[in-house]
């Protein structure tokens, strides 16, 4: 770790000189890129310098204890040594955390896709509950939510729904939500009072820029159709709904929530880019997860990650063995405690490999 910190300090010094160079300042794109790198390294380097200073205090205090006979000096050295040794442990932990590789997508907006799984109408209702849960969470965070596409059922649920959440750090908080969510409860239609188990899948995709995903227009097929509401009831007299197919991968995105065909096309293209980016990201994460014991941060779509048990009022995350007995507030968007637990475990794993 110390060798890595020395290299980072040298790089920080080099960058500091470059960002003060008038020639580089005149080239704003280059200057901004270097300033970003410099600002990312600064907290690590400052903490490393604090680490060295405390280590020097430890060495000096030990030297005084070895060489001095004056009791007042020795007592002062003992106090300084005790305080410094306590500080160094905390600083080492802080350095390890600072050295954890940053996820380049953490500050991005997210596209959330929720689909009802096993369980028929009850699964669709649960998908609707999850949609409202994440919408309420976004409200609590001061983030903005906009619907991208939806396929409602006649009972008030969703076969599938996708929506965009705009907010600083949205992906850093919500990326752990990808996977299979399971609900255990008594459906309103169940006369015998039996508990049913249903599932819904959640995919959290970082919103991507055009420069991050290049799509050949020849690889796309656009189909238009007439948007319709529940039970096939027509809600639009024009062919404004769009179905977008990416031929090489077979990815299909439909969007019918806007009255404008152009707006539906733009939304469908945004979702497609996010899915293709997520595919590439998943391939990278498979290689990483092979070297890690846990899948906390990988968002494996087939993994059952959480159970919502309504009769017992509990929600359990199976990746970190955390159970909270506050299902009512959790399903109303109070999910920070669970997310904080997931982040802590994920960071601890990454720190252990440094």
Image: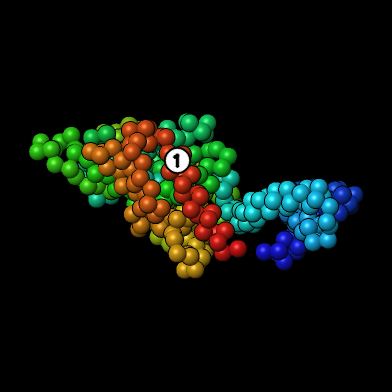
- Residue 209 visible somewhere in the drawing: yes
Q: Quadrant of residue 308?
A: top left
Which quadrant would the C terminus be assigned to in this image? bottom right
- Say whether residue 123 is left or right of residue 255: left
Q: Is residue 35 above or below residue 226?
A: below
Residue at (37% x, 52% y) in the render? 321
Provide residue 319's location: percent of width, then percent of height.
39, 54
How was this image coloured?
rainbow
Q: Is residue 123 above or below residue 15?
A: above
Name the one closer to the observer, 7 or 92.
92
Residue at (42% x, 48% y) in the render? 177
- Residue 98 visible somewhere in the drawing: no
- Mark 1 crowd level (few <14, some 14–19, many ≥20, 10 Å Cα): few
- Say whether residue 165 is left or right of residue 51: left
Provide residue 81's location: percent of width, then percent of height.
73, 52
- Say whether residue 94 is left or right of residue 257: right
Name the one closer to the observer, 58 or 245.
58
**Disc 1, SS:** helix
Question: Please, which residue is most extreme toward the right here?
Answer: 22
Residue at (76% x, 49% y) in the render? 75
> Label 1, on which residue?
337
Provide residue 27's location: percent of width, then percent of height.
83, 50
Which quadrant would the N terminus be assigned to in this image? bottom right
Name the one closer to the observer, 338 or 287.
338
Provide residue 63's location: percent of width, then percent of height.
81, 60
């Amino acid at each position: 770790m110390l060798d890595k910190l020395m290299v980072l300090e040298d790089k920080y010094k080099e960058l500091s000189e470059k960002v003060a160079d008038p020639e580089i300042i005149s080239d704003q794109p280059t200057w901004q890129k270097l300033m970003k790198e410099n600002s990312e390294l600064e907290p690590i380097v400052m903490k490393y310098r604090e680490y060295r200073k405390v280590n020097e205090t430890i060495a000096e205090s030990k030297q005084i204890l070895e060489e001095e006979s004056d009791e007042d000096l020795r007592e002062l050295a003992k106090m300084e040594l005790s305080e410094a040794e306590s500080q160094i442990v905390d600083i080492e932990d802080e350095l390890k955390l600072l050295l954890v590789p940053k996820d380049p997508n953490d500050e991005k907006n997210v596209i959330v896709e929720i689909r009802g799984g096993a369980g028929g109408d009850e699964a669709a209702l649960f998908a609707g509950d999850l949609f409202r849960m994440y919408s309420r969470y976004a409200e609590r965070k001061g983030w903005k939510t906009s619907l991208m596409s939806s396929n409602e059922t006649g009972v008030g649920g969703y076969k599938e729904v996708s929506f965009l959440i705009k907010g600083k750090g949205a992906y850093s908080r919500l990326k752990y939500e990808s996977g299979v969510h399971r609900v255990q409860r008594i459906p309103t239609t169940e006369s015998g009072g039996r508990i049913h188990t249903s599932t819904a899948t959640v995919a959290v995709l970082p919103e991507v820029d055009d420069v991050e995903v290049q799509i050949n227009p020849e690889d796309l097929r656009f189909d238009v159709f007439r948007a319709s509401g529940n039970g096939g009831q027509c809600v639009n007299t024009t062919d404004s709904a769009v179905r977008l197919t990416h031929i090489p991968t077979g990815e299909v995105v439909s969007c019918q929530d806007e009255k404008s065909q152009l707006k539906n096309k733009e939304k469908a293209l945004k979702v497609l880019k996010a899915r293709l980016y997520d595919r590439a990201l998943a391939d990278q994460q498979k290689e990483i997860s092979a070297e890690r014991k846990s899948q906390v941060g990988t968002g494996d779509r087939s993994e059952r990650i959480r159970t919502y048990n309504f009769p017992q009022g509990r929600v359990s995350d199976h990746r970190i063995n955390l159970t909270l007995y506050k299902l009512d507030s959790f399903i109303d968007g109070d999910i920070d405690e669970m997310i904080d637990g997931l982040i802590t475990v994920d960071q601890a794993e990454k720190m252990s490999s440094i």
